Amino acid sequence: LHLLVLSGANLNLLGTREPEIYGSVTLADIHNSLELEAQKLQVNVSCLQSNLEGELLEAIHSARNSYQGIIINAGAYTHTSVAIRDALSAVEIPTVEVHLSNIYQREEFRHHSYIAPIAIGQISGFGANSYILGLQALVSYLKK
Ligand code: DQA
């Protein structure tokens, strides 16, 4: 199994960005932990971050023939991007949505996700571990 891990807007700033909300772990740390967990689960992961919505769309489009699953933390695009949701629907790749923070404990505008209705499920609130839990959930879903 080859899985794509996508991170969107501002997630390159993890480590220094609002650490009281997002913790002090960097995105590079998260990518390393994902690699380790993927080895344990005997799957392959590719990790990509972009601040550009269009770049995320193109990554989703080109995943079509090479990836069996997607883990996505779209950052603020979660709450704004019909385009990312449509791209995920178009490629029909099983997707798990993840967030470091619990978006339902935060401002009202974070309570709505455009991605949630087309995802297998969502993991929100476990900090950096949300990505690992997302990977485990996606792998167990795909192996069934
Ligand atoms: C986030 C939550 C979003 O509301 C926010 O815009 C982010 C990060 C999270 O991982 O908790 O950038 O997706």
Image (cartoon, rainbow, N blue to C red):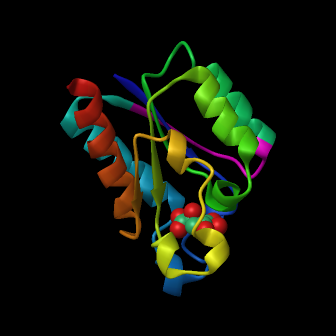
Position of the C terminus by quadrant? top left
Relative to 92, is 128 above or below?
below
The part of the chain drawn in magenta is 45-53
User: x%, y% of residue 45?
Assistant: 41, 34
Residue at the bottom extreme of this rendering:
20
Q: Quadrant of ligand 1?
A: bottom right
Q: Position of residue 54 (x, y in %)?
A: 80, 38
**In the figure, is residue 81 to the left or right of 100?**
right
Pick whichever, 76 or 14, lies toward us. 76
| Residue 44 is covered by the magenta coloring | no
Q: How many marks?
A: 0
Identified at 59% across, 57% down, the residue is 113
As displayed, is residue 103 above or below residue 12?
below
Q: Quadrant of the N terminus?
A: top left
Residue 141, picture quadrant: top left
Q: Position of residue 28 (x, y in %)?
A: 50, 56
Q: Residue at x 28, y 44 (%)?
A: 137
**120, 21: nearer the viewer:** 120
Residue depicted at 52% across the width and 45% down the height: 117
Q: Is 110 on the left or on the right of 102, as rendered?
A: right
Residue 33 seen in the figure: no
Q: Nearer the viewer, residue 11 or 86?
A: 86
The image position of residue 84, as x and y in percent, is 68, 40
* For residue 121, side relative to residue 142 (left or right): right
Is residue 85 visible from the viewing direction of this image? Answer: yes
Q: Residue at x 78, y 47 (%)?
A: 52
Q: Is residue 58 left or right of residue 135?
A: right
